[in-house]
C-alpha cells in the first residue's frame, strides 16, 4: 500500500454571515429604545465614537466665549440655539476592495484613515438631533413625580397602628403578598401564622385590622369578602344587600336580578335598588395606588401630507449624534499595536454608523410601500384599511419577507390618522358581498362602533351584530363576531345590559 500526497481543487458556494452583516440585522430588528441603549453602550466602549451633540455644543461655547472676549455682544438665542444641517452621503473612506450593495458585507483590508478623518470632520454628525424640549415629549415635572405605592400607603398606617413586634411582622407579610388590586392572594391565615411563627387567631386579628385600613377592603381574599367589608364599614343595614353579596355573586355578575328576587323572595325593584348600592362599592381597592407609569411611544417615522401627496420622514430625535473623533488621528502614526487597535475601533465605528443609516433607509422604504398600499386608510380612516401581508411589501420593494418582519416589529409611525405600529397595517382579509375585501381590523372597528351606538338597556346580541354587518356587505359567522368582541374587550350582551 503506497502513501502519496495529492492536491485537489474544489469549488463550493456557501452563505457566510460576517460580523458586520450580523450587526446590521441586529440593528434592524431593535426598537427605538433598544437602539438608543445600544448606541450609548458603544459610545462608552469605543473611544473613537463620540456624541456630536456634546462636541457641537462645546465648540459653540468656545466660539462664543472667544467672540465675547474680543468684545462682541452675543445674543442669548445664538448661545443656546442649535441648527440642523442636511446629512451628506459623502465622506466615505476609500477602500482597497469593492463593496457589494444589499445584504453583503464590506471586506475592509486597508483604509486610508488619515484622509477619511480629514474629510469626515467637515461633515455633520449622524443622525441629526432636535432639542429635547419638543412639545411631544412629557415635561420635566411630569417625569420627576413619584406616586405613593399601595405598599407604602399601608405600611405608613401599619406603623401608626399600635401593633406589637410579632403583629407588625404578620402585617408586613400581609402587605408583601398583596396583588396590584389589593387582594391577599396565595396565602391563607394558617400560612401567615406558620411563616411568622404565631398562632392563626393572632394572624386573623391582624388581617381584619388591615382590611379596615384605607382603602377599605384591602387585603380581602376574594371579591365577596371585599364587598362585605366595605358594606359593613359603611354601616349598610340591609339584609337583602348582604345576602346578595354572600349568596348571589354569579347572578350579580350576569345581572340576573330576576333569579335573585325569586330566591330571596323579594320584589324585583328592591333587588335592583340593592344592586345600585353594590355598584358604588370598589371591587379593586388597590387600583388607585397602581404604580405602573405610562409608556410614552416615540415614532420611528412620520408620514406628512402635503397637498395630495404623502411624504415619509425618519425621526432621529433623541438618538445620539454619532461622530468619529479626530482626536485619535495622531495615534495612527504611533506603534504598530496602537495603530492596529485604533484601526479596529475606527472600522467598528464606521460599520455602526453605516448600519444605522441603512436601518433608517430601510424603515423609510418599507413605510413608503405601506403608504402606497394603504392610501385609502391615510385618506379616509380605519374603516378603509385593506388586507395586506408581508409578501406584498416584500415584492414591492424587492426585499425578503423576514426583513420586512424585522422592520415592522416594535416600530411606530405617526400618521394623520394617529400613531400606529407598522405591524398594524398587516392583517387578513374578509370578503364582502360586493366582491371587495375588507381588513379584519376594519371589521373589529365596525363591531366596536355598533356596540357603542346600541341601547344600553337592550344591547345587541352576537346574532344581531351579524345581521347588521351583513347589511353593510360583511358576511361573517356568529362565532367570528364573538371572537372579535372578546379581543376588543367587549362583554356579552347579558353583561352589557344596564337596568339603572
Image (cartoon, rainbow, N blue to C red):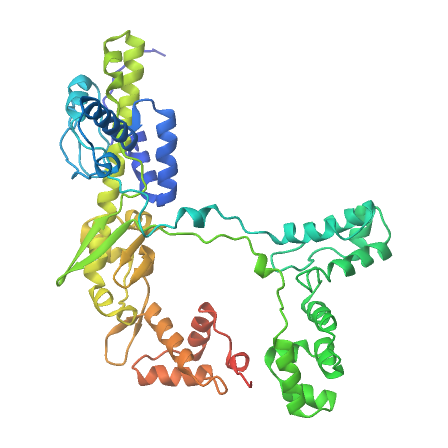
Question: Looking at the image, which residue is at 23% across and 29% down?
Answer: 60
- Could you say which is closer to the camera, residue 91 or residue 358? 91
- Above or below 494: residue 30: above
Residue at the top extreme? Answer: 335
Please state the total of marks drawn on the protein image.
0
Q: Is residue 177 visible?
A: no
Image position of 114 (left or right of 325): left
Quarter occupied by the C terminus: bottom right
Residue 403 percent across, percent down from the top left: 29, 47
The part of the image, by quadrant, that contains residue 74 is: top left
Image position of 287 (left or right of 197): left
Residue 140 percent across, percent down from the top left: 41, 46
Quarter occupied by the N terminus: top left
- Could you say which is closer to the camera, residue 220 or residue 156? 156
- Above or below 284: residue 179: above
Residue 468 percent across, percent down from the top left: 36, 84
- Could you say which is closer to the camera, residue 294 or residue 76? 76
Residue 443 percent across, percent down from the top left: 35, 73
- Above or below 333: residue 424: below
Question: Looking at the image, which residue is at 58% across and 51% down?
Answer: 148
Image position of 59 (left or right of 482): left
Q: Is residue 80 visible?
A: yes
The part of the image, by quadrant, that contains residue 121 is: top left
Amino acid at each position: 500500500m503506497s502513501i502519496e500526497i495529492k492536491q485537489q481543487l474544489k469549488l463550493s458556494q456557501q452563505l457566510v454571515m460576517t460580523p458586520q452583516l450580523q450587526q446590521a440585522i441586529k440593528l434592524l430588528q431593535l426598537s427605538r429604545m433598544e437602539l438608543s441603549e445600544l448606541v450609548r453602550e458603544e459610545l462608552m466602549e469605543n473611544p473613537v465614537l463620540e456624541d456630536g451633540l456634546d462636541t457641537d455644543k462645546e465648540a459653540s461655547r468656545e466660539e462664543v466665549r472667544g467672540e465675547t472676549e474680543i468684545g462682541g455682544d452675543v445674543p442669548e438665542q445664538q448661545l443656546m440655539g442649535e441648527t440642523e444641517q442636511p446629512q451628506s452621503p459623502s465622506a466615505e473612506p476609500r477602500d482597497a476592495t469593492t463593496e457589494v450593495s444589499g445584504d453583503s458585507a464590506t471586506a475592509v483590508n486597508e483604509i486610508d484613515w488619515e484622509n477619511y478623518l480629514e474629510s469626515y470632520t467637515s461633515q455633520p454628525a449622524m443622525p441629526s438631533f432636535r432639542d429635547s424640549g419638543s412639545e411631544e415629549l412629557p415635561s420635566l415635572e411630569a417625569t420627576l413625580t413619584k406616586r405613593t405605592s399601595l405598599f407604602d400607603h399601608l405600611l405608613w398606617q401599619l406603623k401608626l397602628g399600635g401593633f406589637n413586634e410579632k403583629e407588625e411582622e404578620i402585617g408586613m407579610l400581609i402587605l408583601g403578598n398583596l396583588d396590584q388590586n389589593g387582594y391577599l392572594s396565595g396565602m391563607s391565615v394558617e400560612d401567615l401564622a406558620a411563616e411568622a411563627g404565631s398562632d392563626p387567631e393572632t394572624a386573623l386579628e391582624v388581617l381584619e385590622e388591615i382590611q379596615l385600613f384605607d382603602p377599605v377592603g384591602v387585603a380581602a381574599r376574594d371579591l365577596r369578602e371585599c364587598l362585605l367589608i366595605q358594606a359593613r364599614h359603611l354601616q349598610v343595614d340591609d339584609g337583602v344587600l348582604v345576602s346578595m353579596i354572600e349568596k348571589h355573586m354569579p347572578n350579580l355578575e350576569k345581572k340576573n336580578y330576576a333569579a335573585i328576587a325569586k330566591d330571596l323572595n323579594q320584589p324585583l325593584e328592591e333587588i335592583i335598588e340593592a344592586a345600585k348600592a353594590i355598584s358604588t362599592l370598589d371591587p379593586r381597592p388597590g387600583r388607585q395606588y397602581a404604580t405602573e407609569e405610562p409608556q410614552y411611544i416615540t415614532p420611528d417615522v412620520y408620514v406628512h401630507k402635503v397637498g395630495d401627496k404623502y411624504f415619509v420622514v425618519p425621526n432621529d430625535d433623541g438618538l445620539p449624534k454619532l461622530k468619529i473623533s479626530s482626536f485619535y488621528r495622531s495615534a495612527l502614526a504611533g506603534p504598530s499595536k496602537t495603530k492596529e487597535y485604533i484601526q479596529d475601533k475606527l472600522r467598528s465605528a464606521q460599520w455602526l454608523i453605516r448600519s444605522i443609516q441603512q436601518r433608517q433607509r430601510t424603515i423609510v422604504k418599507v413605510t413608503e410601500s405601506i403608504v402606497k398600499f394603504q392610501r385609502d386608510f391615510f385618506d379616509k380612516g380605519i374603516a378603509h384599511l385593506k388586507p395586506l401581508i408581508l409578501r406584498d411589501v416584500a415584492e414591492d420593494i424587492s426585499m425578503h419577507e423576514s426583513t420586512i418582519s424585522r422592520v415592522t416589529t416594535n416600530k411606530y409611525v405617526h400618521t394623520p390618522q394617529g400613531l400606529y405600529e407598522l405591524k398594524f397595517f398587516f392583517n387578513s382579509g374578509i370578503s364582502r358581498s360586493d366582491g371587495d375585501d375588507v381588513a379584519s381590523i376594519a371589521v373589529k372597528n365596525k363591531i366596536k362602533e355598533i356596540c357603542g351606538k346600541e341601547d344600553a338597556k337592550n344591547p345587541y346580541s352576537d346574532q344581531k351584530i351579524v345581521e347588521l354587518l351583513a347589511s353593510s356587505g360583511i358576511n361573517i359567522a356568529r362565532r367570528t363576531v364573538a371572537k372579535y368582541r372578546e379581543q376588543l374587550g367587549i362583554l356579552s350582551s347579558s353583561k352589557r345590559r344596564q337596568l339603572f
